[in-house]
Every structure is written in structure tokens, then in C-alpha cells.
Amino acid sequence: MVHAFTAAAQAGERSTEPRCRGSPTTATHVAQLLATTGPLWARFGVRCAPARERSRTIRNDHPSPLAATGLLSLGLLIPFGAPAAAQRVAQIAVNLTSTVPAKHVTLIHDGLSELVETRAPDAEALLAERGFDRTPEDALSVDPSSPLADGETVVFQAAVPVTVIVDGAPPRAVRSAAASVAALLAAEGVRWDRHDRVSPNPSAPLASTQVVSVAHVERWTETVHVRVAAPVVRRYAFNLKPGLVKVLAAGRPGLKELRYTVSRSAGGRGTQRALLVARIIRAPKVRIVAEGIGEYTALSELAERSIVGTLQLADSALAMVATAYTAHCSGCSGTTASGRPAGHGIVAVDPRVIPLGTRMFIPGYGPAVAGDTGGAIRGRRIDLGFNSDADAYRFGRRPVTVYLIR
């Protein structure tokens, strides 16, 4: 190269471009190489053009260094002190003269995508050919030593210098190829959650020379809304068959607000919550459901379902002793004290305990009305009317619970 520059100066050439010369075959290869590596020469401020006329380029009789050493001597054209660039030039020359068929690879680097025709055997050689110096901090989507395949996509993300500051500690300079601030913090082992203050936003892309700060928050206030279930009131309906259910009022759930103070232990390994205040911001509405209990023929079934323990339709419940009578009993007229005909559903009571006209429900008997009195019915005694002597004898005498209907 010294000969070329000297000869050009002696000839009075204006151009300071080094001239490449050699045999016709070598010149052809050089022309191909220069077309491929033009951007690389430009990175080092060197331009190289093939010689147009030997007599105009070099005016001495010294032999050409390029012709004597071949393609690999192109490394001499790189400015002194750039060994990495020389290695890249050597790699380009090897790839250019390789007999391996060319492959078409999509190279995505720093967000830019380009289709590359290459004879590079692997991703490492491809990056060297394209002028990228890969470092351990850089991100590469494939194994750098794995063979390249035609049509393959290679993603290369160069690491950028950033500064990380955690809880006011001294700044720490790192190089990272993370795609976002959150990915950087994960790679650096910095734990954080939604309560901490992270700047820039964790979802923001990472940029060169960026300062990323994390301030952990040890105490905060948390508000929680809790659904309050609507209370259910069950009423038993005589006009519904047993097992049938009818919703009388749909009701509506309420909403309760709970406010806590939350403290985080050192290192963020656990939290403690203390309730500050609780208030109902929407009261629930009662859901009312009617359940059928039917007529006397279904009362035994209701008793098996423990209906006595679940009745809620009564104002009060009285423990009484019940007997049975019919309209045809001895001394009976068939007409009750209330003027109603005697029979099933009309019972005799002591008016001092249960006023006449009171509606009631008696398990094992059914709905009834206090419509009669009797000389022997005193205190907590009740006489139940039946339609036949057989039913009255079958019932006999027994203790019962009488539910007075609201």
C-alpha cells in the first residue's frame, strides 16, 4: 500500500484513494470483494477503487503487493491498529471464495430487517461478514455456531449501556440487550411489583444511556370491594304443591368496601394487612322465596323433611297437646262456634291462648283456623277437626307444635 500511495503522489494525482491492482483474475475477485465490503471500508474512512490504467496509477517498477499475496492481503489496506476489522475482511474473503451455495437469510438487527445473500457457514460468521462485533451481552436468537439454513431468520440485538439505580444505592453501569425496562430488571435480578416506583415505565423499550431507577415501597393503603350476598327469606305457601318454589322477590347483592394498610417485610418476602375501615356502600335487598307445602296428604312427607325446624312463616310456635274430633261425634252439632261447618282445617282452641279466627300450621295435620271452642279445651290443649272417624282415630292424641301464621 505504501508503494501505491507513493506512486500516486509522484504522478501528481488529486485522488488519495489507494488503488488496487493485480492480475486479471485477482482483479476480478477484488472487484467482487470491494462491492461486498464497501460499507465496511467506509466505517474506517478508507475508499478503495480498482485501477483503471496501470501507467496512471503506479509509476515505478516495483512488483504489486496485492498480486504477490492474493486476496487475503487486503487486510493490509485496513489502517494500522484495527485487527478486528482485518479479521472481518479475512472472513468476508473466505465467504466470498467459498464453494458452498449461497443462502438467503433474513437478518433482523436493532429492529431493522434485511434479506441477506451469504455463504457464511453459521450465525457468527454472518455477523462478522455484516460488520457486527458480537459481545457476550448481545442477544442472538440462534446458536452462533449452529449451521445456517436457507430461509432462516436471525435476530441480533446489540447490547446498549444503561445505568441502574435501586433504592438510592450508587449507580451501577451495565450493558444489556433487554427489549424493555422490565426485562432488564429481571435480567439484573431486581425484584419489584405494582406498588413500587419504577422509572421509566416497565413496559417502555430500553434505550442507550438510559437511567433506570427502582424505589421499593414498604407501606401502602389498599382498598378492596367485597360482594355481600342477599339474605334469603323462605315462606311456605299452602297453595303450592310440595317441592314447588316460587320467587316472590329476586333481591340484589350488596357491596362492601374494606380499606387496609399493608406493610411489607424487609426484602419483600411477606406482607401484613391491618383493617382500617369497613363500610357498606350498597345495602343488599332481601330475596323472598315461597315453597309449597300443599294439603294434608303431603304433611307426612313434609315432616320427613324436618319442616318443623325450618318453618319461618310463624309469629310464634306453641307446644300443645292435640286430640281429634269429627262433626259426628257424640254431643257435636256439626257447626262450630265461629259458624263454620266442622271438619278438617277447623280446630277448637282456648280463646285466651289462641284467639278465634287465627290461622295456623300444625305439622302432621296441616293448615288450620281457630274456629271452635270446647269445654275440655283449656290452656295449651287443641282439638283438631277431621272429616272421618277413621282419620280421627288414626291421629289419636299426641303432642304437637302449633305455628301461628303471620
Image: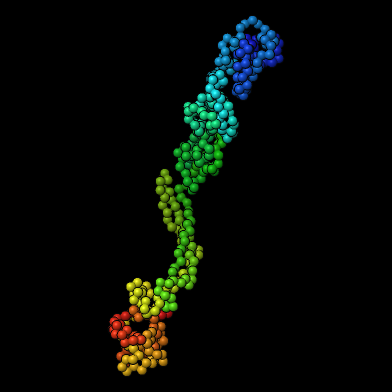
| Residue 365 appearing in the image | yes
* Residue drawn 55% across the image and 41% down it: 204
Q: Position of residue 150 (x, y in %)?
A: 54, 29
124 above or below 391? Answer: above
75 above or below 162? Answer: above
* Residue drawn 62% across the image and 24% down it: 39
Of residues 111 and 307, the one nearer the viewer is 307
Q: Position of residue 232 (x, y in %)?
A: 43, 69
Q: Position of residue 6 (x, y in %)?
A: 65, 10
Left or right: 168, with 66 as reference point = left
242 above or below 262? Answer: below
Residue 70 location, quadrant? top right
Residue 367 location, quadrant? bottom left
* Residue drawn 51% across the image and 36% down it: 178
Image quadrant where one finds the N terminus? top right
Of residues 313 and 52, the one nearer the viewer is 52
